[in-house]
Amino acid sequence: ELHYPDRLNCGAELLDATIARLGADRPCLRLEDGTVWSYDRLRAQTDRIARVLVEDLGVVPGHRVLLRGATTPWLVACWLAVMKVGAVAVTVLAAQRRTELATMIEIAEVGHALCDARALDELAAVDAPGLRTVAYGGSADDDLLALAAAKSDAPFPAVPTSADDVALIAFTSGTTGRPKGCMHFHRDVLAIADTFSAHVLRPSPDDVFTGTPPLGFTFGLGGLVIFPLRVGASALLLEQPSPTALPAVIERHRVSVLFTAPTAYRVLLDQAGDADLSSLRRCVSAGENLPAATWEAFHARTGLPLINGIGSTELLHIFVSAADAEARPGVTGFPVPGFRARVVDPATGAEVPDGTPGLLAVQGPTGCRYLDDPRQAVYVHDGWNLTGDTYVRDPDGRFRYQARADDMIISAGYNIAGPEVEEALLRHPEVREAAVIGVPDEKRGQVVKAFVVLAEGVPADEGTAKALQDFVKSTISAYKYPRQVEFRASLPRTPTGKLQRFRLRSEDL
Ligand code: 3SK
């Protein structure tokens, strides 16, 4: 059980309380050029920006402030300043365009925006009459950083928010439909550090974190800001994160904790050559299913068991995971301490026996609170969050991923999990990426179709397709093999790297 005081400000806890405990003169944020921001420097810049928010922009507790920019110390300082003044951060992705921004601004009733000067164009094009936008990192006189430089850097006393005041609204990109804003409280921000990070990741103050997810994706916000700051560690911020550059980055900066997605782990392994990865200690994979073959290849190269996890924007971060000796290839793991999980029948909501596929249902200190959206009733039933993933619980209590509920394929009466077929294909040395969907078929209802990105130089012809089909038949139950194979140069993904199988499905209708 987590217990927090009634008055709690997560910005003050992450920054001021960490400094009070461990000292201000410690490395906090690192840049690729070797620049290091100490905790004190981050505190001073945060407090100056907090003064601009209150004194110049009239921000009061509860105001929604949109944050948009690359992963830089300034974005981190803006986020912490919004927390400290008791406002609500609406952190969006740099990849999101004007129509998406307009929808999020409308839903979250955003009144202010702090935006990296380099990402201003799309935001400036949004027709939002009440929105006051201030750029940072540009050359204008009214640039946020110029305004902040004129302020005192004396400690800014954080607004004594309630533990249950909303601290952030995180939007789910959603595979279809209008985006949903997920509200999270000040206590939720600390809860993800005090559950997944404290009990599964177990970082130390000497750790150097890095990763590719942006701060507008709560996977990145947790892994690059909340978790390192909670323990006084440092984070290397990658402004233009590229999985191909990861081996060199890890070697150069002696990175010990890595957060990225399964696809990026595969690219990292491809590019690693003889790079020195020995500084790595804890490596987290989430965002989508981690194939057993990727887990095994990473283990063979580094000796490290990848920490697989499933999280969601609705629950803020990871809620089922396993590390160290508990980790197994092809398995997500156990409920993170503080969370409960079970597998339920989608029709009745009743728990199903071990070994039977059903919907994953989760309860914990965080939870789904959509902002003014009737889909709340679809996600939360009887206090259980239904994540939309099909899972099996093994007799040893481990949770094993099957598919997103809408990625299950029913072919000639067989239930086939698309990701299992993808995993089998990814074991083939000539396959770089794979996406599997069901396509309509007169005889079988649906048949399995695979979209495959081949390794360089491999011919995209019938011979290769047949070889891949035979390979799948020899790896998993033969009835699951892809009866159709199409080769692609790349696969559609969301800005956070998730495969968009629905786009392949809609092409195929
Ligand atoms: O798995 C995910 O998609 C996720 C979403 C939000 C936060 C963390 C994670 C891993």
Image: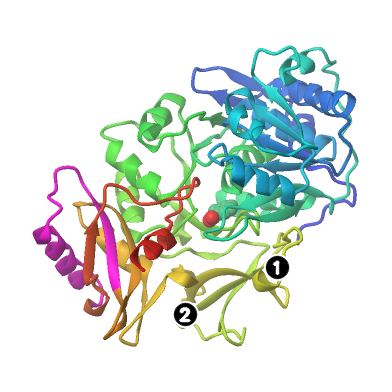
* Residue at 29% in and 36% down: 271
* Residue at 26% in and 34% down: 273
Q: Position of residue 351 (x, y in %)?
A: 59, 84
Q: How many marks?
A: 2
Q: Quadrant of the C terminus?
A: bottom left
Residue behind mark 1 = 376
Residue behind mark 2 = 357
Q: Amino acid at mark 2?
A: Pro
- Tell me the quarter of the picture where residue 99 sits: top right
Q: Which residues are magenta?
A: 448-477
For residue 193: magenta? no
* Residue at 52% in and 28% down: 239
Q: Amino acid at mark 1?
A: Gln
Few, some or many C-alpha atoms within 10 Å of disc 2 (few <14, some 14-19, many ≥20)? many
Q: How is the image coloured?
A: rainbow
Front-most of residues 303 and 50: 50
Q: Quadrant of ligand 1?
A: bottom right
Q: Is residue 287 above or below residue 483?
A: above
- Tell me the quarter of the picture where residue 328 sits: bottom left
Is the C-beta separation of discs 2 and 1 under 8 Å? no
Q: Is residue 234 above or below residue 498?
A: above
Q: Quadrant of the N terminus?
A: bottom right
Q: Secondary structure at mark 2?
A: loop
* Residue 190 visible in this rendered orientation of the protein: no
